[in-house]
């Protein structure tokens, strides 16, 4: 297990949070295989993160939080993902929705959603529609105007941690333009348990059905402002990097422990060459992402670099996990080996929006100075 690296400079309270996290990671990692096996939510781990002050630390100071910043947040996401990427994914989505709503409704509702986060409420992003797919910020489902607000009927799918959520960040089209609301699940919202997935099984990313669900005017989010945190965009690369860390650690453990005709597998040259190649790519992806986080902490616009970091991280996670399968041989292919779980989890990073295909289209068009064949 790689000890979580404290980025410098750090505040005193974040340093003690890193120590707290380091103490908890073995316990979180020990439960990961069981959450994967039974597709159970890591609820105890998520509530522990809140109770231990991690949610509060990331919330901006203006909203009553610790204002710990992107570098701290990213380091926690990556460490959690190495231990259990389902915990890291739900935490990323939870904080993305909570802090997003707190920022976007601050003018209208003050610290309503920030206070809810601080008292331990849970949040989820109900954004992806069956019809909009990866273009989750461009909802196709049109809201119906009613007295005091709107209603929505339709579905949002792959909503991580939705069964625990006290609040939902929901998007909808109003006169064709995207609009966002913060609402509490009620009897008009149903959960369809679709999440019998290949990987990230502990996220239980279910389908939510909306049946004339009321979206009150006063819960409508305002436009994003300068300095608003983008915690989902910043965190997604860290999930894949943590999975890559875990896969590489499992590979190394196997290669050192496996002896073939009297020699450790780790001494075979092809293994050393391949490990070197993947290690330096992983280090490069990590460095690029950490630079983006540091720049964002310094106030620079970083969404473009977060997308590039996600593409790099998604690819290296799959490549490291595939190499781990090769090095693991037959024993690494068994259900009893963690390697097969890392490969399944790594694949999910590529699918989460924006997918590697969408990102490649946007980045490629930017480099070529042309229009993207697909708009994200
Ligand atoms: C583990 C996991 C957790 C998730 N958690 C959440 C969550 O909490 N909240 C939430 O709202 N959503 C969540 N999602 C949904 C996710 O963010 C994507 O929106 C969703 O997976 C897209 O799925 P889809 O089947 O509609 O894919 P599609 O969009 O249909 O993609 C199918 C293929 O087409 C490609 N493609 C799609 N659009 C384009 C394009 N414009 N240009 C080029 N290629 C394109 C894709 O790359 C992919 O290869 C989660 C998904 C996963 C896998």
Image (cartoon, grey):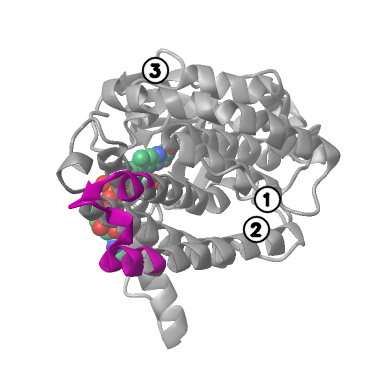
x, y (%) of residue 241?
47, 52
Toward the top, the furthest residue is: 187
Nearer to me, 277 or 73: 277
- Range of residues picked out in magenta: 253-276
Question: Which numbered disc covers residue 293?
Answer: 2
Q: Position of residue 339 (x, y in %)?
A: 29, 42
Looking at the image, tell me whether mark 2 or mark 1 is earlier in sequence order: 1
Instruction: Give the CA separation, mark 2 to mark 3.
Output: 39 Å
Residue plotted at (21% across, 55% down): 326
Kindly check if marks 2 and 1 are in contact, taking CB atoms under 8 A apart as contact: yes
**Label annotation for residue 269:** none
Which-is-in-front pick, marks 2 and 3? 2
Return the residue at label 3: 188
The residue nearer to you, when weighing 23 against 76, is 23
Instruction: Determine which of the numbered discs, if any, sits on residue 70 in the image.
Output: 1
SS under mark 1: helix
Badge 1 density bin: few <14, some 14–19, many ≥20, Cα 10 Å: many
Q: Residues within 10 Å of mark 3 (few under 14, many from 20)?
A: few
Q: Which residue occupies 81% across, 53% down?
A: 9
């Amino acid at each position: 297990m790689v000890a979580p690296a404290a980025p410098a400079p750090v505040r005193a309270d974040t340093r003690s949070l890193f120590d707290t996290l380091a103490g908890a990671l073995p316990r979180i990692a020990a439960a990961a295989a069981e959450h994967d096996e039974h597709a159970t939510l890591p609820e105890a781990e998520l509530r522990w993160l809140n109770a231990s002050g991690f949610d509060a630390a990331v919330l901006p100071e203006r909203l009553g939080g610790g204002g710990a910043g992107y570098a701290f947040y990213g380091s926690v996401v990556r460490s959690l993902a190495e231990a259990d990427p389902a915990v890291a994914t739900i935490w990323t989505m939870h904080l993305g929705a909570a802090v997003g709503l707190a920022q976007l409704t601050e003018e209208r509702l003050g610290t309503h959603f920030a206070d809810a986060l601080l008292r331990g409420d849970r949040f989820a992003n109900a954004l992806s529609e069956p019809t909009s797919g990866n273009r989750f910020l461009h909802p196709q489902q049109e809201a119906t105007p009613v007295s005091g607000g709107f209603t929505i009927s339709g579905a949002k799918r792959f909503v991580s941690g939705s069964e625990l959520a006290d609040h939902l960040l929901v998007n909808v089209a109003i006169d064709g333009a995207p609009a966002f609301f913060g609402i509490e699940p009620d009897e008009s919202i149903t959960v369809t348990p679709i999440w019998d997935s290949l990987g990230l099984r502990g996220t239980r990313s279910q389908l939510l059905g909306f049946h004339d669900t009321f979206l009150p005017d006063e819960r409508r989010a305002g436009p994003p402002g300068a300095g608003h945190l983008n915690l989902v965009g910043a965190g997604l690369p860290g999930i894949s990097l943590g999975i890559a860390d875990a896969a590489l650690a499992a590979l190394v453990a196997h290669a050192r422990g496996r002896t073939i005709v009297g020699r450790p597998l780790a001494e075979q040259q092809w293994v050393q060459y391949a490990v070197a190649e993947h290690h330096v790519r992983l280090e490069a992806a990590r460095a690029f992402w950490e630079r983006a986080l540091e720049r964002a902490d310094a106030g620079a616009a970083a969404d473009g670099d977060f997308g590039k970091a996600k593409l790099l991280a998604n690819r290296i996670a799959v490549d490291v996990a595939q190499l781990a399968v090769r090095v693991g041989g037959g024993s690494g292919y068994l259900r009893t080996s963690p390697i097969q779980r890392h490969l399944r989890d790594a694949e999910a990073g590529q699918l989460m929006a924006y997918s590697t295909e969408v990102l490649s289209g946007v980045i490629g068009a930017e480099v070529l100075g042309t229009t993207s064949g697909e708009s994200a």
